């Protein structure tokens, strides 16, 4: 027993909750330098859980498609509490 004390995990900050989010980037080849830099800035600012990439090619263009799963911090105070007793009446 931990005496009622709660330990914070690696992905938890006391007073904050993390929400898993997904972001998709589609970057043209060639010419996607600005979007690539935007994605790199995003990656440096988030706790990334998983990332996958795929090249998409059509008759007219070729693109990289990136799917990024990340944790987004949401302060606990931002969550609205729902009184289900009122809602279910």
Image: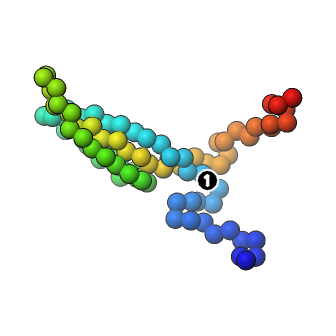
Relative placement, left or right, of 87 versus 24 is right
Q: How many marks?
A: 1
Q: Quadrant of the C terminus?
A: top right
Is there any visible trace of residue 22 in the rendered image?
A: yes
Which quadrant of the figure has residue 68?
Answer: top left
Identify the residue at image location x=27%, y=44%: 53
Is there any visible trace of residue 35 in the rendered image?
A: no
Relative placement, left or right, of 21 versus 53 is right
- Viewer-nearest residue: 14 or 60: 60
Q: Quadrant of the N terminus?
A: bottom right
The percent position of residue 82, horizontal first and vertical second, equals 76, 37
Figure check: 5 above or below 84? below
Figure check: 71 above or below 11? above
Estimate how packed mark 1 is, as few (under 14), some (14 to 19) or many (20 or more) residues with alpha carbons within 10 Å.
Answer: some
Figure check: 9 above or below 36? below
Q: Label 1 belongs to which residue?
A: 16
The percent position of residue 88, horizontal first and vertical second, equals 82, 31
The residue lying furthest to the top in this view is: 60
Identify the residue at image location x=67%, y=46%: 77
SS state under label 1? strand
- Viewer-nearest residue: 80 or 83: 83
The percent position of residue 61, horizontal first and vertical second, equals 15, 26
Identify the residue at image location x=57%, y=46%: 74
- Viewer-nearest residue: 5 or 61: 61
Which quadrant of the figure has residue 34?
Answer: top left
The percent position of residue 87, horizontal first and vertical second, equals 80, 30
């Amino acid at each position: 027993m931990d005496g009622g004390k709660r330990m914070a995990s690696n992905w938890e900050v006391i007073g904050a909750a993390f929400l898993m989010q997904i972001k998709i980037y589609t970057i043209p080849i060639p010419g996607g330098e600005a979007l690539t830099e935007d994605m790199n800035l995003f990656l440096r600012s988030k706790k990334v859980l998983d990332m996958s990439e795929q090249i998409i090619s059509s008759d007219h263009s070729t693109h990289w498609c990136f799917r990024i799963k990340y944790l987004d911090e949401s302060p606990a105070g931002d969550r609205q509490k729902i009184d289900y007793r009122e809602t279910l009446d």
